[in-house]
Amino acid sequence: MPHHHDPLHCEHDHGPQHIYIYSPAGAIRDKAAFKRGIARLKALGHEVEVDPDAQAVYTRFAGDDATRLAAIHRAAASGADVALITRGAYGLTRILPGIRYKAVAKAIDGGMKFVGLSDFTAFQSAVLAQTGAVTWAGPGLIGDLGVEGEPDDIMLACFDDLLTGHGEGAGWRMAREKPLADGRPAVPDLYVKNATLWGGNLAVLTGLVGTPYLPQVRGGILFVEDVGEHPYRIERMLTQLLHAGILAQQKAVVLGQFTNYKLAPHDKGFKLQSVVDWLRTQIKAPVLTNLPFGHVATKVVLPVGAKVSLSVEGRDALLYWGHAH
């Protein structure tokens, strides 16, 4: 379970936050979820400002490239505490050269937290590569806060920790795995400190290899997740990162949630665990599993680009960045 402050010790509560909602990638198709997400943030007491082009549509995108770039720059200039994407879906990679990174970094220096996931990985990676500034891998408005029924309580608690400045880490329990061939545990007990946390959506990251928008992180902790990608495709993308020399430079690789794919008769026993087992034979760094992050309801919030510590004891893993503030 994620690691939280006791909610009774909130003397540092920052009160209501100014949240700027914008659409830097895919067009909104679920208008009801959009409205529910905004209503939910307002019900939590926050001031919600919606970008004028949040609901723009240009083919599959939330407006043409210039429109989406302008939305990013309005978010950066808004003075909000948090800039939250409506949703991911492809769209950011093609506009990375047009982003004014100095303006984004200046907003972050001023305390703004850019939050999102999925296709937003492109923005987060580019900001880290170009400026070194920290963004946050976390919920999106529509898929997380705008769900029918109640949003996931762990996701809400982690998001609240981010808003109030209480987020210090994320703890979780890894999957139970067979020992390695030589009898050692699949993941050894370990403690890594002062390593840069980076990553996000695997397909998006892989698409940035060889560009100025992929961070050159040495001695880092890389986390990855994906949706709708068959295990062999996940392995192919990891192979790209392996052959590009990226995986060998990391202190640990942390696998989040890989969801919404179907195995085929042709697989003959090849599955996601096969990919994990193979990866462990290719790199010296430990490969952790089951991080609660990805295209799933239960997700933690992670600082992309921050210095973190990672500890593993048995199946219990903890990423900690409380010392970073």
Image (spheres, helix red, strand yellow):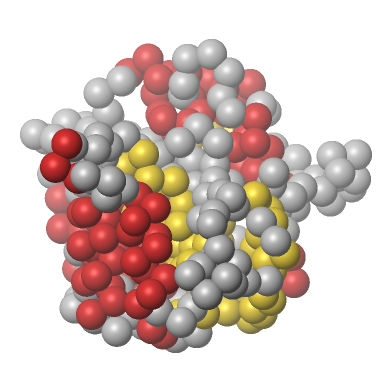
**Residue drawn at point x = 62 percent, y = 42 percent:** 159
Query: In the rendered image of this protein, does residue 85 appear above or below residue 303?
Result: above
Is 150 situated left or right of 228 in this image? right
**Residue drawn at point x = 46 percent, y = 21 percent:** 147
Quarter of the view holding residue 15 = top right
Most foreground residue, 237 or 13: 237
Query: In the rendered image of this protein, does residue 153 appear above or below residue 177?
Result: above
Most foreground residue, 310 or 115: 310
On the image, the x and y values in percent for residue 144 come to: 48, 31
On the image, the x and y values in percent for residue 40 come to: 57, 22
On the image, the x and y values in percent for residue 140 come to: 44, 38
On the image, the x and y values in percent for residue 109 come to: 55, 69
Q: Residue reaching furthest left?
A: 59
Point out the image quarter for the N terminus: top right
Is 8 situated left or right of 96 in this image? right
**Residue drawn at point x = 40 percent, y = 39 percent:** 295
